[in-house]
Image: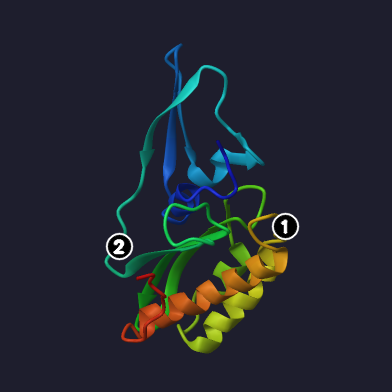
Amino acid sequence: NASPIGDMPPCLIALDATVVLSSADGGRREIAAEDFFLDYRKTDLRAGEIIEAVRIPHMADHQTFHVYKVSKRFDQDISAVLGAYRLGLDGGRVTDVRIAHGGMAATPKRAPACEAALTGKPWTAETAQAAADALARDYAPISDFRASAGYRATVAANLIRRLHLQTTAPAIVSEVMAL
């Protein structure tokens, strides 16, 4: 339904998934998941088409995938912000990265300025901070009853910092669990 706060679309975008669409007349086409979402609650699904499959390429050995959901309640709640990150590292350097967020724009959307701030750079706290700062060029979030625009921007930046901590210092606890 192209909801900007759906949890799965940012994951599919970060994983470089493709969507296979089929129509009753036998037509078939494949599009990148990031191109499937056109506008607020509008997809590239044409009349008479269905989603036949979603294809997710295997990740390379040097890549990891992380997803962070921020919502008011711990379980079964709609996201205020969801960040999905496919990160490729080699020798402490970011070789490739795909970042997508939900709740930050009218559609689930990649963060190209953030990705550019990371690609080819050493994976340090300073690089993570530069990437977090770059998010302001990628998104202009709105305020609604789930979260303010400022809260969303702050959370998304902090999720980049969390990604850095989880991938460089896994012994540091970076999440709060409800008991």
Residue kind at label 1, given as amino acid type: Ile
Q: Quickly name the residue at label 1.
A: 142
Q: Mark 2, mark 1: which one is toward the viewer?
A: 1
Is disc 1 placed on a helix, strand or loop? loop
User: Closest to the observer: 15 or 159?
Assistant: 159
Q: Residue furthest front?
A: 179
In the rendered view, would you say 45 is above or below 167?
A: above
Residue at image location 49% in from the left, 44% down from the top: 33
Q: Is residue 56 left or right of residue 38?
A: left
Residue at image location 55% in from the left, 35% down from the top: 1
Residue kind at label 2, given as amino acid type: Ala
User: Closest to the observer: 79 or 137?
Assistant: 79
Separation of residues labelled 2 and 1 (CA atoms) = 35 Å
User: Closest to the observer: 104 or 65?
Assistant: 104
Residue at image location 57% in from the left, 40% down from the top: 2
Q: Quickly name the residue at label 2.
A: 60
